[in-house]
Amino acid sequence: MIFNPAAGRRRARRRLAGFLERWGNRVTLRPTERPGHAAGLAATATGEGFDVVAAAGGDGTVHEVADGLLRATGGANGPGAGQAGPIFAVVPIGSANDYAHSLQRQFGTSPLDSPAAHAVDVGRLRWTASSADGSDGEERERFFVCCCGAGLAGRVTLESRKIGWLQGVPLYGLAAMRAVRAAGTPAEWTVTHDDAAPVVWPTRSFHLLLGRREGGFLLAPDASLNDGLFDVVRLGAAGRWGMMRMLPGLARSGPPVAHPHVALGRCRSASVESPTPLAVHVDGELALIPENGVRSVRIDLLPGRLRAKVCAVRS
């Protein structure tokens, strides 16, 4: 069990205590010490032959552990790659727990030692590094299991890092209001879905979801974790006040289906080109910030690449 002591605004130890009363003598507990550490711990656990590798924390820990497992088991290579490794278990003790929400809603909960798990889809973000970070031309990638957001979505993640006294929907709601308030005129992005012709859209925010929620906001109410498709949400040229008015509905019931500045759809892959450097998050973790100078990314769905389950904290 890879455990983030800082999860849930440092309330993780209390949330995990009851869980470990039942499972503690059968669990090898490995705390994270720094950002990115969980991915390395997951890769090490895979090499040591553990049957189950659990992420105990919030969506940041979930993302890092899943990314580490997928890299360790060749998660991007060939049909079913990634399924030969350990079962990925989620113990939700963080603040938003978006991925756990989707797993539990679709599959229910499973005991930590149960061999039952579900083949779920995975997303992969790829880009070419720019000279801004000293690695011009290098191809990079990040896996994700719940959501990927670019534009305003990435800037919301940036703002959330500056707020230390909130969690869950209040945290991301305040971060969203700050990001919207600071937003300028939406740039025209060139977006390509699957094999369709590229479309040029004025775009504030672009989201690809495997799960239902992003930062506690219900962006894809009908999303399925194993249907082989992303749910797509694009927020277009709405003004600041229009975006502000949209936020409560996004948190409660999802994006409006007949809004002139909202486009919904589904796809297996997408590419984005922006005239300005992008801010992009994966599972709420920043993959790119504008200072990286990256203006083009590609996102692909890898069907059924991970065996996953969620465990009830009070079990």
Image (cartoon, helix red, strand yellow):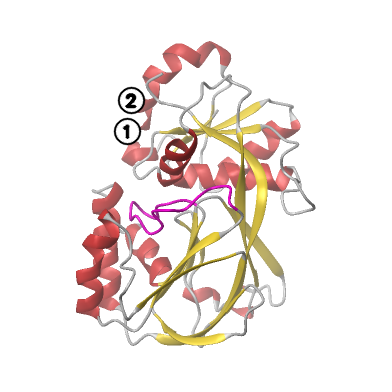
Name the residue that disc number 1 marks.
Answer: 11
Query: Would residue 206 appear left or right of 180 to someone viewing this image?
Result: right
For disc 2, the neighbor class at 10 Å (few under 14, some 14 to 19, many from 20) is few
Between the residue at mark 1 and the residue at mark 2, the CA separation in whole angstroms equals 6 Å
Q: Residue at x 38, y 72 (%)?
A: 152
**Percent x, y for residue 314?**
37, 21
- Tell me which amino acid carries mark 2: Arg
Closest to the observer, 91 or 34: 91
**Residue 163 appears anywhere in the view:** no
Q: Are marks 1 and 2 in contact (CB under 8 Å)?
A: yes
Quarter in which the C terminus is drawn: top left
Nearer to us in this view, 139 or 270:
270
Which residue is found at the position 21% from the left and 71% from the top? Answer: 244
Residue 66's label in the rendered image is none
Q: Magenta residues?
A: 211-227
Residue 142 visible in the picture: yes
Q: Main secondary structure of the magenta part?
A: loop
Residues 181 and 162: in front is: 181
Residue matched to label 2: 14
Q: What amino acid type is highlighted by mark number 1? A: Arg
* Residue 178 in the image, given as x and y percentages of width and height: 25, 68
Find residue 94 and report its image quarter: top left
